[in-house]
Amino acid sequence: MLGIDFPSLQQVFIVLMGTFIIKKLVKKLMQKDDKKVVIHKTDFKKDVVYLYQFHRSPVVPNLSPFCLKLETWLRINDIKHEVVPSWMMRSKEGLLPFVELNGEHIADSQLILFKLSKHFNKEDKLSKEKLAVARAVDRMIEGSLLFTLTCFKVVKNTAKSIHPSVSGVPLPEFVTNLVAPLIHEQIKGRLIANGMYKHDEADIIEIMRRDLQAISDILGSNKFVMGDEPSTVDCTVFGNLASCYYLPYDQPMKRLLQEEFTNVRDLLERIKSRFWSDWDSLIAKQ
């Protein structure tokens, strides 16, 4: 009578059920439950690292800073490895990435690098002083800078970050739009609990700027953070920054690298060019 089409009870029910199911799925994917260890690759090849990580993105090889960090380390050190992409697999700690090596399950990117570097004799050949600096930078990035980056990469751009054209997730756009508010609240809640998202936006950017300044000052005119050759800390820098910098939407860190910390931007390009020569072909397949 009023020229308005109202949804039927069936349509309302479907939408409500769909929302409920998606909410449960998002919660399940993002919770950190301890899981029973299952070795997936039982016919493994000796000393081949099986890297379980998220699927490739259409814009960067991996949206996860930890997955990108770990794969970069494997490439830099010329370690034989096979990538096993998955949306659903998780480590015993409920996270990605994880690896399997000679039938052993290893979780958490930091612990993975500890064990792989020792197993393959690829520990950084640096002085004690440089090792200390590299460790401090690594922990600053994953204990501070990462959270500032996530505020703008995901929380303030949730719909963009999970859009199929960016995430590569095999879902139609209307579904990712439906999921976006749920992911937004999940990530925002973690950043509030962490303390970062309690700050004003300007203060978050200032923390980000100071962390980037520290990296830039240590890098100086070096080819890599600790000198002429890459070390583990370069992988941490690349994983955390490249997984944001090459995204097709604006973020404060992109402006900071382009305008203030150009040597850090150049470091990303150097690593990308030298160790990710197949970058374009990898993302083109998505």
Image (tube, helix red, strand yellow):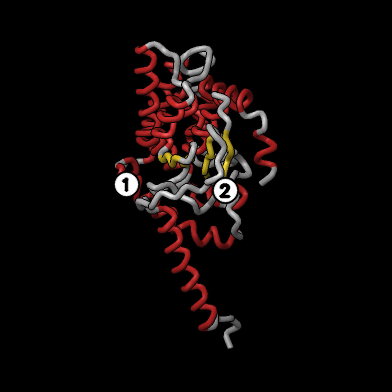
The percent coordinates of residue 134 (x first, y second) are 39, 20
Disc 2 marks which amino acid? Answer: Ser
In the rendered structure, find residue 192 and report the number of the disc placed on it: 1
Residue 79 — which label?
none
Q: Are marks 2 and 1 in contact (CB under 8 Å)?
A: no
Q: Can you give x and y, in whole percent of width and height, for residue 275 in the image?
A: 61, 26
- In the rendered image, the quadrant that contains the N terminus is bottom right
18 and 127: which is toward the camera: 127
Residue 127 higher or lower than 164, as above or below: above
Camera-side residue: 131 or 208? 131
Instruction: Indicate the position of residue 28 as horizontal and vertical percent values.
Output: 41, 58
- In this rendered view, identify the residue nearer to me: 204 or 165: 165
Task: Judge by depth and name the residue closer to the eye, 253 or 173.
Answer: 173
Q: Residue at x 54, y 15 (%)?
A: 223
Question: Quick check: 28 above or below 202?
Answer: below
> x%, y% of residue 261?
49, 22
Instruction: Answer left or right for 97 relative to 129.
Output: right
Reading the image, the residue beneath label 2 is 167
SS type, badge 2: helix
The quarter of the picture where residue 208 lies is: top left
Badge 1 density bin: few <14, some 14–19, many ≥20, Cα 10 Å: few
Q: Amino acid at mark 1?
A: Ile
Q: Earlier in the sequence, mark 2 or mark 1?
A: 2
How far apart are the alpha carbons under marks 2 and 1? Answer: 24 Å
* Residue at figure coordinates x 41%, y 40% from the top left: 107
Q: Is residue 44 above or below residue 237?
A: below
